[in-house]
Structure formats: C-alpha cells, structure tokens
Amino acid sequence: MAILSVKKLTKSFGGLTAVANLNLELNQGELVGLIGPNGAGKTTVFNLLTGVYEPSSGTIVLETEDRRRELQGQKPYNICKAGLARTFQNIRLFRDLTVLDNVRIAMHQNANYGLLSGLLHLPSYRKEEERLKKESYEFLRITKLDSKANELAKNLSYGEQRHLEIARALATKPVLLLLDEPAAGMNPAETAQLTQLIKWIRKEFHLTILLIEHDMSLVMKICERIYVLDYGMLIAEGTPEEIKSNKRVIKAYLGEDVSNAGD
C-alpha cells in the first residue's frame, strides 16, 4: 500500500522554481533515499511535506490503515499529528532544556489529559505525565542516551545530538519518518552506528522512512529505492544498482567512481 503519494508537487519562490512537478510514492515499510547535488531541492521537498512551505501546486497524500489525509496547506503540527515526523539538516533541538525534556515535549501531542486536569494537576494528569516520562526514557535508551537524560541538550556531542533528534521524532509516534542528512558531520564509526540504528528502528516501529543523505555508502547499503533530484526536477528513480549505473545521475551527481559505493 502506498503510504505517501506526491503528485505534480511544485514550489516557486518568485521567479525561481525550487521543485518542479515532482511525483513520488512510498510504499508502507519502505526505506527510500532522496539524493542529488547541493541546491537540487531535497530539503525543500521535506519542507513541503512537513508544512514548513506551502506548495505552489500539487498534492501530498498520506494514507494509513484508518484514514486518508491531504497534507498540502496543512500546518506543521497537524501534519505531525497525522503521523509524519522529521529531523533537520541543521540540528534544531531545545538546546537549553534537558535531553529528557526534549523528548517529553514531543510526546505531549499524544497526552491523554485535558486542559482542566493539567491546570489543576489532577491525578489523571500526574498519572499521564509519569507514563510520558517512562516512555521518553525508553526512546533515550533506544538511542543510547538514557545515561544523559538530565544533561542539557547543548552539552551533547554532535553525534549524540543527531541521535536525540531521532529520539524526539520517534516520540511523536510517526508512521512516516523523514531523515534530513542524519549522518552529516559524523565520523565513519558514528555513521556505522547510525546505519544500524536506522535499520533497527524501521523494523521495531514498522516505519516507512524517506532519507536525504550525501553519504553514498550509507544510501546504497540501506535504501531499497532511490529518487534523484537535479535543479528541482526528478531525473531518475530506481534501485541502488540502477541508480549507480544511470548515466544521467553519474553526470549530474555521483561521478564515475560511484560503482564502488556500498561495496
């Protein structure tokens, strides 16, 4: 079943077309890559999918077992509630809050208490807050950050901050997870750990994942299909092997030595 269907998605900024007539489809449970040169429009696509930008034209449909939702024109918080979460190319944590509170904030959209209960700190509020705290620790355990739960987010290493972004995204209980260059700035050992984490969370949480990444070794190892953008236009789509041998993709982005990527 197609969980995400994007049809003729276009975004123009004045006279500049950043994304042009993009068609993209993700099936439930897939791990798909979105690659291309700097400035190709990849992050713009993520911003359109998550409501940061409103499309100039086109449709974005998220379809789960219980509901079909058109996301174009929706606010980011409504898109998040619908089941689509993301991380950012430039880390956007609440730097002066603790690691634990960064995750707890993400979980509050699914809190099961009302305004009155929260204002008066009724037993239902306290019980629910304890549940959220316990589940937040579990997301930190998954990303190996539970020992640093009470540290400020800004004091984490770069790689740990990347993992915290993933923990925070998972805490929103998504069905579709968008990862925007999760390995950026990581050393090879950190990238290897991240690769295993992505594989594990996909299986454990039954997630569909769309991944932007410049590390072609990571992309070729874990993605089942890959979309390639150049100047805002889709120039290729296929399996890693098909993409590695696509002459147009090699010329626009990958280069002649890509045949060894992922080996």
Image (spheres, rainbow, N blue to C red):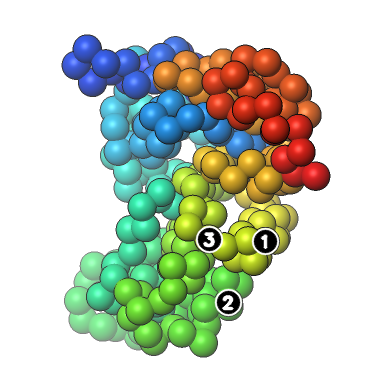
Give amino acid for label 1: Ala
Q: Answer yes or no: do the residues labelled 3 and 2 have beta carbons within 8 Å? A: no
Q: Position of residue 159 (x, y in %)?
A: 49, 67
Label 1 to label 3: alpha-carbon separation: 9 Å
Q: How many marks?
A: 3
Residue at label 2?
144
Q: Earlier in the sequence, mark 2 or mark 1?
A: 2
At label 2, counting other C-alpha atoms closer than 10 Å, the crowd grade (few under 14, some 14-19, many 20 or more) is some
Residue at label 3?
186
Residue 177 appearing in the image? yes
Residue at label 1?
192
At label 1, counting other C-alpha atoms closer than 10 Å, the crowd grade (few under 14, some 14-19, many 20 or more) is few
| Above or below 218: residue 114 | below
At label 3, counting other C-alpha atoms closer than 10 Å, the crowd grade (few under 14, some 14-19, many 20 or more) is some
Give amino acid for label 2: Lys
**Camera-side residue of 112 and 150:** 150
| Above or below 102: residue 49 | above
**Camera-side residue of 95 and 56:** 95
Give amino acid for label 3: Met
